[in-house]
Each structure stands twice: as C-alpha cells, then as structure tokens.
Amino acid sequence: MKARPGMTLAIMLVALAAGCGGAPARDRNVVIVAIRTPPNNFDPRQGNDETSQRVGQLVFSSLMDVGPDLRVVPRLATRLDNPDPLTYVAHLRRGVKFHDGHELTAKDVVYTYASFLDPSYISPFKGAFRVLQSVRALDDYTVEFRLKEPFAAFPAQLAGVPPIVPEGSGDSMRTFPIGTGPYRFVSAQEDVVTLAAFEGYFDGRPNNAGIVLKVVPDDTMRGLELRKGSVDVVVNDLPPDMVHQFETAGSFVVTRDPGLDFSYLGFNMRDPVVQDKRVRHAIGYAINRDAIVTYLRRGLARPAVGLVPPQAWAFQPDVRTFPFDPARAKALLDEAGYRDPDGDGPQPRLRLSLKISTNEETRLQSTVIQQDLRRVGIDLDLRSYEFATFFADVLKGDFQIFSLQWVGGALADPDIIRRVFHSAQVPPAGFNRGYYKNPDVDRLIDEASAALSEDERRAKYSRAQQLIAEDAPYIPIWNRVNAIIAQPGFSGLHLSLTGDFQSLRDVRWVGAGPPPDGPTRPN
C-alpha cells in the first residue's frame, strides 16, 4: 500500500511507541493494536481478508447489524420493511455524516449495492446478492430492494459486509476508505494503519482518540511488544500459551468472551482420494479435538459441531460428529481399500497433503493433527506458505486438504450454509472452495432461502446441516473463545460473539494520572 500524506504521523507514532522500557512517550488515548497481517484492500465490497474486514468494521457502517442473539438489528437503517416477499424497504437515519462531511443519503446506499448488479464487477461477496433484481431510491432517505425470488435471509446480507460507501467513490476506496463508522482513515503503509476517532459519528464519539493497527507477523514478537509497552492491545492474535502466560503474570488485563470463529479442515472434493467419504470420516475420527482444545488451545476454544454456531437460531445439534476413535478410523480406511501394509511397521496406508499458512498457531495445530493421523496410518505432508500465496491456492482449488478459520460475523446467519456448500457458490462468486456438490443439499438450501417463516427455514437448514455433516466436506475442529489482552490502565475491553473490532471504540485509558501529551494524536 502506498503511504498517504498522513504517513509521517503514523511513522512518528510507532517510532515513539517502540522505545525499550519505561512508559512510551505518546498519547495513551491512541490505542495501538497489534495484528498479524496487513490489509490487502480497504474497499469493503472487495476486501475479504481478516485485516481488511477489521479496518472496515472501524471505518464503515452497514444498513443492518448483528445483535447479541445473532439476529439482525437496524444500524444505518432505522427499520427494514418487508411489504411483500419480493420487496424490502430500508428507512435511513437522518443526519449521518461520512468522514468527509457530506450526509449519507439513499444515493450512497443504491451506489453500494448496484455494484453487485454489474456483471463485470468482481467481488467475493457477489454471491450474497444473487437474488437482488434492483435497488432504487424512493426519496433521500428511503431505499427499495426488489428481489428475483423470495429470500428470507436477505436482511442478513445487509448486515456486516458490505457496509455503505459514498456514491461515486470508485476505486478510491481500495487505498483511502471514507465511511460513516466510528473512526476515519488517516494513513496506511505496509505495517501501520492509522485511524482517528470520528467526532461526528452518529452513535457517539469513541472513548479513545484513535486506533493504530500495527502489523507484527510473528506471534512471539507480538507478545514481546505487548510486554514492553510498544503496543497496547492484542485481540485474538496471540497463541493460547501466551494468553495463559499473560493471565498468570497478573499485571495485564485479560478478558475472555464467548466467540464464534470456526477452525476446520477443508477437502478438495475433486481429488480422487479425499472425495471418498470413508477417508474423510477416518480423518475426522483420528483427530483428538478434546486434546487440541484442552492442551493446545488452553481452553480458548470448544469442540465445534459444524459451520453454524451453537448460539445461532438455526443451529442443529443432532448431526454426525467425530469423537476421537482411532480404531474406527482404521476400520474405515480398511473399508476404503487403504489397508495397513506392514502391521505395526512404519509404512503408511496412504499419503495426503495439508496446505496451511505460516502462522505459528496454525502450524502447531497442524502438527498435532499430523501426529494423530500418523497413528492411524495416514502420512500427512504439511505444506506451509505465506498467507497470500496459501489463500490464492485455496481460491484456485489447488490443494488436497487445507486448514482455515471462518471469523465470527460471517457465521451469524445460517445463509452461510448456502455461501459455503451450495454447488452454485464456487469461487469467485462464493465460498464453496472445495467444490462440494449434493443435489439434496442444494434443494434444501434453495427451499430455506425461499421460505417465508422462520420455522420452515429452520427445518430446511437443519436437514441440510445433517446431510452436510454426513458428507463431511469440512471436518470441524473448534469454535474460538475470544481473548483480549491489554496493558494495565485500559478499560472497556470486551468483544461481541462475532469478535467485531467495533468494540474497540469502548476502550479507554484510565491509568494513574492524566495520559501524557504528545504530538502523536491522529489528525
């Protein structure tokens, strides 16, 4: 990313914060948050990496939002009417300002969603709006959405991604985003993104002066920077062992909250070996999830059941799960034709490859899984890549097995089942990266999408979850327990179920005495 005019400020802020020992000579009302990776695209209609979405949560606002019970609630809209199955009408808040001072109107909303109606527009979120027929402004504060067919999950598509961008903003959003969120963009370079509190935020000014997102790729270095005070806060970006160390140290603020993030193994359903369901099931039974959660994750997770989290209204608990059962795994491999060639000898039944990122936490977990599979006769070749390379391979379908995580906000509505498992949702329009296909699942998802009552949707989604769990295109590993670690002297630390970075607006410095003044406040 290119540096913007405010870059000098960001460089000075980080330079002042990086001094060894003692209190950093900077404004403690500017909260420095360590993150793992840089963003790749600030346009919220296109950026689908975790950091780009985190920036988007701070800079932009959506028409609708996800409430504490994972149901959709108004945000920029005061209400969303549904006069008939094909029509939704959003009534906008008045007086909401973009960071450049102009007022949000229906034109901005129409511009944002009209992008997805353009056949030439490429976006990973386009599949969410496949049933959108048209969007138009009825007046300055009222927007009408017309659908091609009934789609009860449509309100959920208006929550989170994409938030609203200014009319006519074009490609400028990629490098200099302007939104209506609690923070305005100041500058960005490869390893620092600087945001300033937006005084005109419609939901009240943040409790701090700004947020600096500092990219620290190495887990150990993130922990060290937190210890020496050159960063203030880390959100879910420290390995469980380090979180445990900070908790036992007693001098840091550590907050745990329930979360939704979902860790899994994904399979390439076009691969001649893992397309055999018996092999996938064997892998599921071979993995000791309880040990991963208890010892590797230090309790910062719970064993996962499926993509839909237990807190969601459409969660179906009565599905096939994979308790740790190595004997059953071996029997399934026998049945699939992969018999043990030498009894207790060293030769494997078969060899598979697992692609992962270079993230240390992922590598440790994958090593544990590799050991579990070795015990049932599967030789698992771990292939780790820098994240951008790894993710590009996943999007291309260039893998046999891969390991990733879904982050909380994406999982709030059961329509995620369609985005991930419907056969029409393969990249680039959707997230069916393993090319899973089951006509019965497609039919149930289509029927759930068109259902007019929540009870009917729940019934269809429940059956789809049961079929998907039986097919096992994913092997669930865990759902995250959120953890925030902060320097002493900060309060307001909490996270929603989705782990949304919006909660950082509540963080404030309450340390002894007034925070030191300095030339480091974002401007």
Image: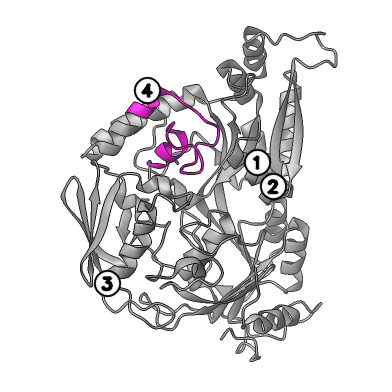
Using the image as rendered, state which of residue 451 and residue 320 is in the foreground.
451
Q: Residue at x 26, y 76 (%)?
A: 94
Q: In the rendered structure, which amino acid carries the disc numbered 4?
A: Asp
Q: Are marks 1 and 2 in contact (CB under 8 Å)?
A: yes
Q: State the separation of the CA atoms marked 2 and 3.
A: 42 Å
Give the residue pinned by disc 4: 440
Give the residue pinned by disc 2: 389
Label 4 or label 3, whichever comes before in sequence order: 3
Q: Quadrant of residue 448?
A: top left
**Label 1 secondary element:** helix
Q: Are marks 4 and 2 in contact (CB under 8 Å)?
A: no
Q: Residue at x 36, y 74 (%)?
A: 203
Label 4 or label 2, whichever comes before in sequence order: 2
Q: In the rendered structure, which amino acid carries the disc numbered 1?
A: Asp
Give the residue pinned by disc 1: 393
Using the image as rendered, state which of residue 235 and residue 450 is in the foreground.
450
In x, y percent, where is residue 160? 41, 57
Using the image as rendered, state which of residue 174 and residue 400 is in the foreground.
174
Q: Which residues are magenta?
A: 415-443
Query: Mark 1, residues whose alpha carbon is within 10 Å: few (<14), some, or many (≥20)?
Result: some
Instruction: Work out whether 172 lies above or below 207.
Output: above
Q: Residue at x 50, y 28 (%)?
A: 436
Instruction: Work out whether 102 lies above or below 294.
Output: below
Query: Mark 4, residues whose alpha carbon is within 10 Å: few (<14), some, or many (≥20)?
Result: few
Q: In the rendered structure, which amino acid carries the disc numbered 2?
A: Thr
In x, y percent, where is residue 25? 72, 86
Q: In the rendered structure, which amino acid carries the disc numbered 3?
A: Arg
